[in-house]
Image (cartoon, rainbow, N blue to C red):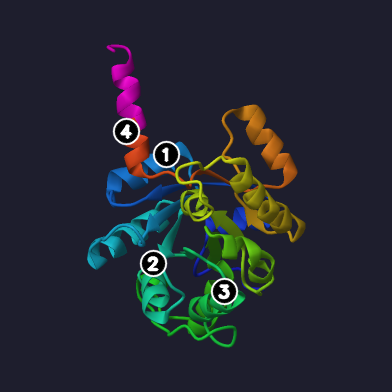
Amino acid sequence: MSSEPPTIVNHAKEKLKAGEPIFGVNVFEALTPSVVKIAANAGFDMLMVDAEHALNDDGRLSLFLTLVRDNGMAPVVTVIAPERALVSRVLDAGATGIVLSHSETSEQMEDLVKWVKYAPEGKRGLAMGANAGYDPSDVARYCREANDAMLILPKIESPLGIENAGAMMDVEGIDGVVFGPGDLSAKMGFHGQWEHPEVLAAIKSVVDAAIARGLAVEPAIMPGDRTDYERELARGARIFGATRQTEYDLYRDALNRVLATYR
């Protein structure tokens, strides 16, 4: 075994491998150094950049992903389809994980893994740029370590995704599951009712299946206090934080708290 430091490190995935929880925050438009630094100082492990609902300049996104990595967090990008043009490009720009929104089939998961992993596990094209720290000195070692470091998470947000969750989680290379309760509740006929009993029952069925498989998963409802957190942690959930919120929500909540005294 080499005594050299790894060529690529995903601290969030390393924590999951050790059975530890990780904490993420979702970002739509605020791809700024301040967002990275504040999240790192607060102790977050993962910044999730949404490329489904928000448009960002490619160059700005690339700089942001590198900055996230340089501050000890995992930059994870949410994409809308398991296609090479969407997956491999953001990985080459520096992302160390992919969330696939509206995940519904095992075939999608197989395609996703294919474009995330280098041969022989996949078909990702090779580039030694931001993704490799611009260091081409040991390509074979980098490819091995990158395959192991990438975090792959289906985002389940439809009844079909719930139905096929087991088959998706059984695809080799899948690391865990996150949820889109807003879309799921709408597709189940309960628009805006993220915590409707039928919506929660559907999510909980997937949470149980993920825990049984030893995969990382969000709880059905994010904890509201330390007691809730410890209960979900003991149950087996491992992904926490503001993964279902955006900077819009966090900023709005903060400003409302500021003005609450005066209202």
198 up-or-down from 10: above or below: above
Chain-order first, disc 3 or disc 4:
3
Mark 2 and mark 4 in contact? Answer it, CB < 8 Å.
no
Position of the C terminus by quadrant = top left
**Label placed on residue 41:** 1
Q: Which residue is mark 3?
A: 109
80 up-or-down from 229: above or below: below
- Give the residues in magenta: 253-263
**Rendered image quadrant of residue 49:** bottom left
Whole-Å distance between the Cαs marked 2 and 3? 21 Å
Q: Position of residue 217 (x, y in %)?
A: 62, 53
**Rendered image quadrant of residue 91:** bottom left
Chain-order first, disc 4 or disc 1:
1
Q: Secondary structure at mark 4?
A: helix
Chain-order first, disc 1 or disc 2:
1
How busy is the neighbourhood of tag 3: few (under 14 within 10 Å), some, or many (20 plus)?
many
Whole-Å distance between the Cαs marked 4 and 1? 21 Å
Q: Which residue is mark 2?
A: 94
164 up-or-down from 25: above or below: below
